[in-house]
Image (cartoon, rainbow, N blue to C red):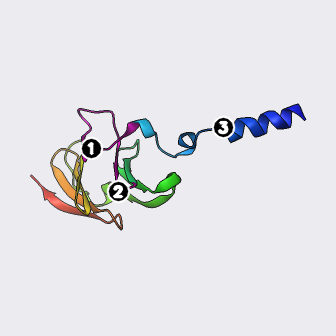
Amino acid sequence: MKLLFFIYFFFSITPVQDLLPYDPAKVSTKQELNFYKTDKRGIKYKGVVYYVESNLNTVTAYQKKGSVKWKSDVSDAFKYAIGLPKIRFIKIEKDRLAVVYAKHDFGEIDLKTGKVTSLGSD
């Protein structure tokens, strides 16, 4: 009986943050992240967290309580990237997430659908 009480008590006080599929400490409320200058990996915007996963190729939009709204692999859109194939910079711009990928490639992700569009390279 004591064990059952302990299990109930332990799980009833576990914070919700521990159950999230991302690290809340790595989420910023700023609308722009340069991964060269910060260890943050996500942006919270209008109640949704846009999080760059550890592989630096996947962006996941998490709604409340960690449910997935959409998940996009940006490497599919940037097939001819020069440099290390990873996301280097993200910025919220109205209804899209601007992305700099590899060394010179840039594009955007639609915040509603997660559709990735390559806009070119310099």
Instruction: Specify the label residue 30 is tagged with.
Output: 1
> Identity of the amino acid at label 1?
Lys
Magenta region, residue range = 26-47
74 sits to left or right of 20:
left
**Quarter holding residue 9:** top right
Residue positioned 32% across, 62% down in the render: 111
- Which comes sooner in the sequence, label 1 or label 2? 1
Q: Position of residue 96 (x, y in %)?
A: 25, 61
* Mark 2, residue position: 46
For label 3, count other residues whose C-alpha is less than 10 Å away and answer few (under 14), some (14-19) or many (20+). few
Residue positioned 66% across, 37% down in the render: 13
* Mark 3, residue position: 13
Q: Is residue 94 magenta?
A: no
> Which of pointers 1 and 3 indicates the residue nearer the eye?
3
Label 1, label 2: how far apart the Cα atoms are: 12 Å
Query: Does the residue at mark 1 contact the one at mark 3 (Cβ under 8 Å)?
Result: no
Please tell me whether mark 2 sits on a helix, a strand or a loop. Answer: loop
- Which comes sooner in the sequence, label 1 or label 3? 3
Q: Position of residue 121 (x, y in %)?
A: 13, 54
Q: Position of residue 50 (x, y in %)?
A: 36, 52
> Identity of the amino acid at label 2?
Lys
Q: Is residue 14 above or below residue 50?
A: above
> Identity of the amino acid at label 3?
Ile
Query: Does the residue at mark 1 contact the one at mark 2 (Cβ under 8 Å)?
Result: no
Q: Is residue 76 above or below residue 20?
A: below
Q: Is residue 91 above or below residue 117?
A: above
Please tell me whether mark 1 sits on a helix, a strand or a loop. Answer: loop
